[in-house]
Structures are given as structure tokens and as C-alpha cells.
Amino acid sequence: MELAGVYVGEPSVLGYRRERPVLSAITKAPVTVPELTLTELNLDGDRQADLTVHGGPDKAVYVYPAEHYPAWAADGFEASAADFGENISLTGVTEDDVRIGDVWAWGDALVQVSQPRSPCYKLAMKTGRRDVAPLMIDSLRCGWYLRVLRPGTVPTAGALELVERADAPTIAEVYVVSFANYGQLPPEKIEAALDFADRVLATPALAEQWSAGIQSTVDRWRTRHAG
């Protein structure tokens, strides 16, 4: 896994919604110094505007695969590094490779994969495309978040090292479970899909907020179709 770029940003006015300013830190700038400090909540110079839905220990660093930028361009987006609000652009891994709970060494720091990214309306404002959220969900080009197990000084170039491989679902698998429409599955596949959802929910490293959303979806489906 090689760093293609590191980006940070402070909250600023992204646009207006119902005539009110929308603050967001989705707009990031490249870090030009060779290293910076990573705390349990942020990279130095990075903050979130709305801490009720962004930031926190389970979403300290947002990672995005660099190979997705050409795919977005092919879909008609003017997409390049940092356009999705990522803190890290990586080469060498995608959502199909990374597992919930994987632990990486980044400089002096240790970080752990905690959850996928769920698109919100601010991404649509940033890209100027209302279809960006469903496209991100359908394509599985979501990226993922890291929690910080050990703060430290991190380089802005070079490699991240996998130090612990988790026996857990991949980011792509978690994303499919999270946004599954079980009603569209053939009846013979629904129970298998729900069983896999249970496996995802049993993953201890999955962020609590994310697992709560999956649990709610699964519980509603099973209650509605009990008997």
C-alpha cells in the first residue's frame, strides 16, 4: 500500500441549503510537509464541521483508493485526488482487499480499519451531482475509515504496512450488506444474505454506529416477514 497523497482541511462554507450556509471540511488541500501528527481524532490541520455525523474515534482518517479516480471520470465526473474528502489516497488496495479490523502501521502510528464511508448530501454539493451517492453505493467505490490505535508521527509519502490481517468481512462485503434490498433477492437467497449480515454484525472491530444501522435493517426485515 503506497501513499498517493495526504490531505487535510478545515470547515468552510461549501454552499447554501434552504438559504442557509452549509459548513463542511470535505474540501481538502494536499499536505506538503514530509510528516505530520496523527492523534486519536484527526491528522494535524484536519477537522470536521458536524461532529454528530462526521469525525470521532471511529472516523479519524478517511482513506480512498487512487485507482477509483479514472472510474469516476469514466462515469462523467471531474474526479481527482481529495475530491471525495479523503485524508489519504492509496494505491495497491481497494474495498475488495481491505477487511474490517485490519491493522496497519503508518509511521509511528498504528491504525485499524473501522467502517466503510456512507455518502451524504455534502458529497453531492461538492461534486455538483445528485447521482453521486447512488453511484458510490452501486459501484462500491466508497473508501473506508480508520481508527487510531496508537497516535504518532506519520509520513506523507511512502508505504503503509499491514501488521495484522483480520478474519472478517471486507469493506465491499459490509457495504453490500448495509445497502442490501432483501426484498429484491430471490426467496432462496434471503436467508443466506441475512446469515451473512449476522456474521458482519459479529465483527468486533466494526464501528458501533455502522453495525447499529445494519442491525436495524435486519431486525425490521425479520420482524416484517416472521412466520
Image (cartoon, rainbow, N blue to C red):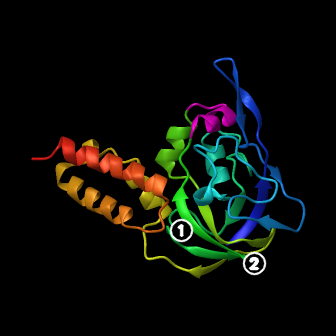
Q: What residue would you read off at disc 1?
A: 98
Q: Secondary structure at mark 2?
A: loop
Q: Give percent across and percent down for residue 27.
A: 76, 43
Magenta-colored span: 120-130
**Residue under label 2:** 108
Left or right of 194 in this view: 143: right
Task: Answer few, some or many: residues within 10 Å of disc 1's Cα (few below 14, many 20 plus, some between 14 and 19).
Answer: many
Q: Is residue 226 visible?
A: yes
Above or below for 222 versus 88: above
Q: Which secondary structure dominates the residues rendered in magenta?
A: helix
Report the amino acid beneath label 1.
Val
Left or right: residue 204 versus residue 36 is left
Residue 71 or 116: which is nearer the viewer? 116
Q: Quadrant of residue 156?
A: bottom right
Please identify the quarter of the rendering in which residue 220 is found. Answer: top left
Q: Nearer the viewer, residue 214 or 139?
A: 214
| Amino acid type assigned to the residue bearing label 2 in the image | Asp
Number of marks in picture: 2
Identify the residue at image location x=90%, y=63%: 33
| Label of residue 18 in the image | none
Q: Nearer the viewer, residue 144 or 224?
A: 224
Residue placed at 85% from the left, 58% from the top? 31
Taking 6 as reference, is 160 left or right? left
Q: Residue furthest bottom?
A: 163
Secondary structure beneath dot 1 equals: loop
Look at the picture and state if 165 lies above or below 115: below
The residue sitting at 72% across, 34% down in the picture is 23
